[in-house]
Amino acid sequence: MAAYLFCLTTGGGVPLFTRSKPDLKPLPYPVVGSLNVVHMFGANHDANLVSTTTEHTKLVWRVYHDSITLIVISVDKRASDSQLQRFLDNVFNSMVLLLGLDEIITIKNVERLKRDLRSCYRLIDCLMDSSEMYGDVTGCVDVMMCQEQLILQDYLDSFVNSADSTFGCLLVSGKVAVATTKWWDLTGQEMYLLSLLARVLPPGSAKDIPVYLPHGSPNVPHRLLNFQIIQGVEVCVLCGPTPSLTEVETELLDRYWRPAMESLRSCLRIHLRGFPSNISVHIGVLGLIIMHVELHKCLGTVHPLSSEESQKQGKSLSIARRRDILRSFYQSVTGTVFPPTPGTTPPEVVENGHGDGLASESPVEPHTEFVHSPLDTYMVGEDHKCYATREGPYQIYVLFSKDVPKYALRSISMTTLSALTKDKLF
């Protein structure tokens, strides 16, 4: 999505860092400077430059707290302004997550800030890469469902309580399998960034990282304790000064998680599919995204069928193509046909200081161009079909093979939504 990313001070236009895709040549500084000057020129004449397009690229500017300016250049023609603004919000909040808000907006030493921002590069680079996850486009945290969910929930609650905390989650291949009640009280963006941070941390069995919650605690740090239980399975705990990392690792980790090993391995085996094998979907379903808008969680998969069902399906779209279509369909529907998902900040809130400069969890409003509130929409392509529907707090986006007739799209989608939500595992 993002090809180039630039971070500068708003007042003086001093470059703080530049990130780009590995296969692209870096842009010369005069070009970067001119992009910032154009934005500053507009601001000095009471014009707010939000975005522009060229023949091959789209550019979006975003200012935070009258202190930090972020500029993104995308070569993806399908990228919308809101999508790129969400990306910039994630970048800025990644900086807040690791450095704290005061450190970023009260710049006392530019060179020191440049050095400190290097700690954010792994997280920012991960945001720039195309991912198997969907949280970057949905604004929700990626989750998975497993039959052992209730058992694992008990183990997690006991472990987190013993660590003198109420915030914890279990990650399976980067997706939240279970989490404590307080963890679900975090904003969707905070949960997404914390899960992403766990994925990009250097390898190790135990890690202790100071983090700031961009919405809940932007200036007071917490400790993120991260432990690898088995390959692909991690447990995270947000806590205060105590207990120590060594104490939790040596006294609590083995005691609470050794009895759960078989359940963890069982959960790991279905991480690609994302939901239990006893939940069946129509053979024409190639992929899906289901969201719980109120709890800020989403489940996305392009492996919805068992291996036997996939073989019966015959020749189909590649996995990469499925993922690309699903993401594009979601982006084309949300904010146009369906209301925008919580987590987007209007540009004026960021620019003029009327808000906190962070991506807010704004209430969902009906789309203003419709006289009614659409509940369903579909799209037909040459080699696929897509259908989206919403019911209560749920939204589901389904990718179908081209052989599924149009009249069956809604009934299959509703049946799939019911199957995934009936046992309250999602």
Image (cartoon, rainbow, N blue to C red):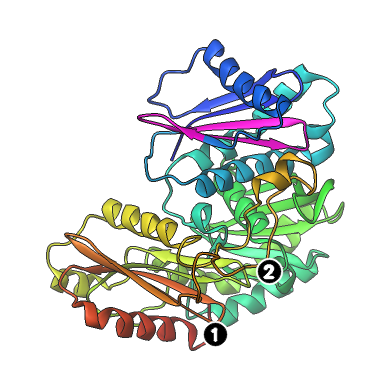
Q: Nearer the viewer, residue 350 or 276?
A: 350
Q: Secondary structure at mark 1?
A: loop
- Measured as percent of width and height from the top left, residue 23 is found at 37, 25
Tag 1 near tag 2, CB within 8 Å:
no
Residue pointed to by mark 2: 184
Pointer 1: what residue?
Answer: 424
The quarter of the picture where residue 21 lies is top left
The magenta stretch spans residue 70: yes
Mark 2: secondary structure: helix
Q: Is residue 368 above or below residue 413?
A: above
Region rendered in magenta = 52-73
Residue kind at label 1, given as amino acid type: Lys
Relative to 95, 123 lies left or right = left
Mark-to-mark CA distance, 1 and 2: 15 Å
Q: In percent of the image, x 14 and y 73: which residue is there? A: 312
Residue 71 percent location from the top left of the image: 58, 31
Q: Quadrant of the N terminus?
A: top left
The x and y percentages for residue 50 are 59, 37
| Amino acid type for the residue under numbered disc 2 | Trp
Q: Locate residue 184: give its quadrant.
A: bottom right
